[in-house]
Image (cartoon, rainbow, N blue to C red):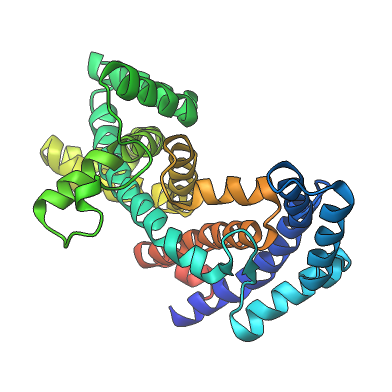
Amino acid sequence: MLRFLLMRIASAIPVLFILSVVTFAIIQAPPGDYADYIRSQLINQGGASFAQADAQAQAYRVEHGLDQPLVIQYVNWITGIVTKGDFGYSMFYNKPVADVVGERLPRTLALALVCHIFASILGITFGIWAATRQYSWIDSLLSGISFLGMTVPRFLMALIIVYLLVFQFNVTEIGSFFSPQYGGAPWSWAKFMDLVSHVWPVVAIATFGGLAYNMRVMRGNLLDTLNAQYVETARAKGLSGGAVVMRHAVPNALHPLVMYQGVVLPYMLTGEIETAIIFALPTVGPAIVGSMAIGDVYVTATFMLVLSATLIVGNIIADMLLAMLDPRVRQYGGA
């Protein structure tokens, strides 16, 4: 198993390198950089003339290496990551990028993990329920929910919920994790419930999309498994319907779903990011959008690199789980 894991990690390194190159190039593709943002701020808010603002922008560009070719900027950035764990310096936040990521990434991962757990439990349960009641009204209802979850954009659901909360229920505390009285307070049950009251829309929207995909995959896999020969044999031996489904059909139907988990965690992350942007929560999403708008390239590149790494890690975890469940994967995968 260790050899299997090492092979997966070794194969992921060049993929991550290619993703870093592509990401950095795409981020730098639009015209302008943070020095241009500084120039516009000096003109619009500082009252400086164009010549004065442009001179300061050029000096800032030279001081921070923004005048160097794109290849040199990338090499300096990736070398700092590999040799020193230095992801660069955030020009807008005026602190190391690692600090910016460290402040926002744990919240994002925690929300995404909660959404992933809810989506997996509910999706698998509803998928089993729908498959064992094929063509019933329950199956039709759950299939309709699955269709909505996969087709309705998450940002649209977020906008609708924001509208209802603000204009129909007069909720004013949008864009924060806690109410003012709980911001610096120690953890308590009241603080936890206050946190839930602020983040439930993000969790609900991201979970809804993941639940729909899990339910659809589980339903299709289980329907195929229920028609297999060994399931018919188990029924012929006199096993109850529940025993046949839970002991024989469901474990084998989970194999494709385990493989699918490799993309579910990144899907949960993107779902959290989309809705967090709408709700302006201090997580990864608003930081990515804000840094892209002003040309804070190292923040954007680092966040995108981390999100790419989650896709790779998710697939490695899925491979490991599948290898534990299916001996054939260990045999032919080199474990």
Question: Residue 36's x, y, as percent?
Answer: 79, 51
Q: Which one is in front, 78 or 149? A: 78
Residue at position x 62%, y 72% in the image:
87
Left or right of 66: which side holds 249?
Answer: left
Hey, which quadrant is residue 204 in on the image?
top left
Observer able to see residue 186: yes
The vertical placement of 244 against 192, above or below, is above
Observer able to see residue 214: no
Left or right of 181: which side holds 224?
Answer: right
Residue at position x 36%, y 25% in the image:
161
Q: Which one is in front, 32 or 6? A: 32
Q: Which one is in front, 180 or 10? A: 180
Hey, which quadrant is residue 118 in on the image?
top left
Question: Residue 176's x, y, as percent?
Answer: 34, 45
Question: Residue 251's x, y, as percent?
Answer: 28, 50
Question: Residue 297's x, y, as percent?
Answer: 69, 58
